[in-house]
Image: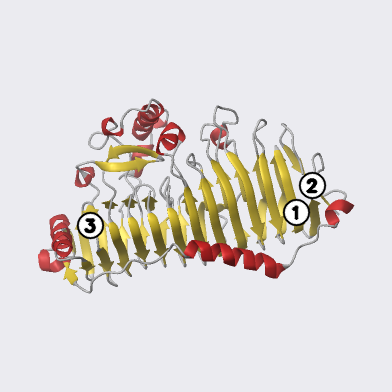
């Protein structure tokens, strides 16, 4: 265990007999505990079911030539299907240009093989504004490209493609300031939204949209139940790709996210959700692959809803800032998350497992388990827990981060095995690394303000590393 105010890099040193006595623990018991946790989560997850009715958008005038505006045709097809009791609204093979698509109860938007929804680059296609959330703060803004609010039994399925068409001259350019020095148009609006959230300005008065520059998400379901996103490829979002908010019973299965170039192009960010399954997905993103979130700062405290009971399994992370991440917007609290049997491998993937927050956020992160994670190359640290995110290490709302377990992780190469940074007044607590192998690290680890770190069966660069969490005892290696 290492604690203290100064940041330090620790190299391989002398061993500890007390630490050696800890052993590795029975693998079967560890697996059984994770299986029990998964079973508890899966008990609250069930894919929605839909009537067999099929409504094809070309029957309503949609033309798959890539240039005809199909917004009205798609809207009419959804409306007719909903009035009839729900079913599958089918996007057949073709390239269908559209503006905002809003789902309704009992609607599955189904993209067949060769079917593409190509979203307009005109911001006016996403007006009028809708009730939404931007980086953890509620507001009215441009509609997400595929959106639903307050719906039950909704889905986006199939083997087609959802193309946000964002690039350096459309949407992403909002993050660039004039001449590279002045604040960007998006930053001006973000600062205004943050100030309104801190002052508890009513959400109805936090209106952006036309003339403003807060980028919309590609898919956002807000305050919905029984949600399924399955099979599709999503690409080039203006911002976050898949963003369920305040939802219960969410399944994201077999989805490919190809959005590596854009700023803030997170793959899947469940926020203030419960009972979430993310399974068999591939992420190639410009930011975090998966990030569990729970609101931001004062607005997150106002809403006060945690994100909990989520299972990530059998996923592949190829590019991004973090593979499985919690934060930084986690004010409402995040707990009971299990990620297992995932592969993360790319020099463009900065970190495999990441928890990030700061003393403006508050909230908690606890009861988090990572099991059987295979890591190839990372560009930074394999595991990061940083409570000084954005360089903020003191403030009025210290996050409570404890009860983090990592079992059976193997990592090939990277600069650091782990990077654990607490706050001087608020350490990271109770982290267990069990049966973890870090094969070729440039340096072992960096730690500051950590209490209760336990290492069992951990090796770095072929050398055992031990620690039992006793106050004042350095983590060390024989």
Q: Nearer the viewer, mark 3 or mark 2?
A: 3
CB under 8 Å between callouts 3 and 2? no
Residue 117, x across and y down, in percent:
25, 61
Q: CA distance from mark 1 to mark 2?
A: 8 Å
Residue 106, x across and y down, in percent:
25, 63
Instruction: Using the rendered image of the protein, determine whether residue 216 is visible from the camera's viewpoint.
Output: yes
Q: Which secondary structure, mark 3?
A: loop
Q: Is residue 302 above or below residue 283?
A: above
For label 3, the residue is 104
Report crowding for label 2: few under 14, some 14 to 19, many 20 or more residues within 10 A (C-alpha): many
Give me the residue at 31% from left, 60% from top: 162
Which circle marks residue 455 in the picture? Answer: 1
Q: Which secondary structure, mark 1?
A: strand
Q: Nearer the viewer, mark 3 or mark 1?
A: 3
Looking at the image, residue 122 sits to the left or right of residue 224; the answer is: left
Q: Is residue 43 above or below residue 302?
A: below
Residue 375 versus residue 401: which sits nearer the camera?
A: 401
Q: Is residue 151 above or below residue 231?
A: above
CB under 8 Å between callouts 1 and 2? yes
Report crowding for label 1: few under 14, some 14 to 19, many 20 or more residues within 10 A (C-alpha): many
Residue 192 versus residue 115: which sits nearer the camera?
A: 192
Residue 203, x across and y down, in percent:
30, 34
For label 2, the residue is 475
């Amino acid at each position: 265990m290492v604690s203290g105010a100064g940041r330090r890099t620790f190299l391989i040193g002398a061993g500890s007999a007390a630490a050696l006595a800890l052993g590795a623990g029975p693998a079967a018991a560890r697996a059984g505990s994770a299986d029990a946790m998964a079973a508890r989560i899966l008990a609250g997850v069930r894919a929605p079911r839909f009537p067999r009715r099929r409504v094809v958008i070309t029957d309503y005038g949609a033309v798959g030539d890539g240039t005809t505006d199909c917004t009205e045709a798609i809207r009419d097809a959804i409306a007719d299907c909903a009035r009839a009791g729900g079913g599958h609204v089918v996007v057949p093979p073709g390239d269908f240009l559209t503006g905002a698509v809003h789902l309704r109860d009992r609607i599955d938007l189904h993209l067949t093989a060769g079917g593409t929804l190509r979203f307009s680059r005109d911001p006016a296609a996403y007006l009028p504004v809708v009730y939404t959330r931007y980086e953890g703060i509620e507001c009215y803004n441009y509609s997400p490209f595929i959106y639903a609010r307050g719906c039950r039994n909704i889905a986006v399925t199939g083997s087609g493609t959802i193309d946000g068409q964002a690039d350096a001259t459309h949407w992403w350019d909002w993050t660039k300031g004039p001449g590279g020095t002045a604040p960007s148009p998006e930053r001006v609006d973000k600062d205004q939204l943050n100030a309104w959230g801190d002052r508890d300005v009513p959400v109805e008065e936090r209106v952006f949209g036309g003339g403003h520059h807060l980028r919309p998400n590609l898919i956002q379901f807000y305050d919905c139940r029984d949600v399924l996103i399955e099979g599709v490829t999503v690409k080039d979002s203006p911002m976050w790709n898949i963003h369920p908010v305040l939802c219960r019973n969410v399944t994201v299965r077999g989805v490919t996210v190809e959005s590596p170039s854009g700023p803030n192009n997170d793959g899947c960010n469940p926020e203030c959700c419960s009972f979430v399954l993310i399974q068999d997905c591939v992420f190639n993103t410009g930011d975090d692959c998966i990030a569990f979130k729970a609101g931001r700062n004062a607005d997150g405290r106002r809403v006060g809803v945690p994100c909990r009971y989520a299972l990530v399994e059998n996923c592949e992370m190829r590019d991004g800032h973090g593979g499985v991440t919690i934060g930084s917007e986690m004010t409402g609290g995040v707990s009971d998350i299990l990620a297992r049997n995932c592969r993360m491998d790319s020099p463009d993937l900065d970190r495999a497992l990441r928890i990030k927050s700061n003393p403006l956020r508050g909230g908690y992160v606890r009861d988090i388990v990572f099991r059987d994670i295979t890591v190839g190359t990372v560009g930074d640290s394999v595991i990061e827990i940083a409570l000084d995110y954005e360089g903020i290490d003191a403030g009025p709302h210290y996050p409570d981060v404890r009860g983090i377990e990592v079992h059976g992780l193997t990592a090939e190469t990277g600069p650091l095995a782990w990077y654990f940074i607490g706050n001087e007044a608020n350490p990271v607590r109770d982290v267990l690394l069990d049966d973890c192998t870090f094969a070729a690290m440039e340096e072992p680890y960096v730690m500051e303000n950590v209490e209760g770190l336990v290492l069992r069966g951990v090796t770095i660069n072929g050398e055992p590393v031990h620690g039992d969490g006793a106050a004042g005892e350095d983590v060390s290696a024989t």
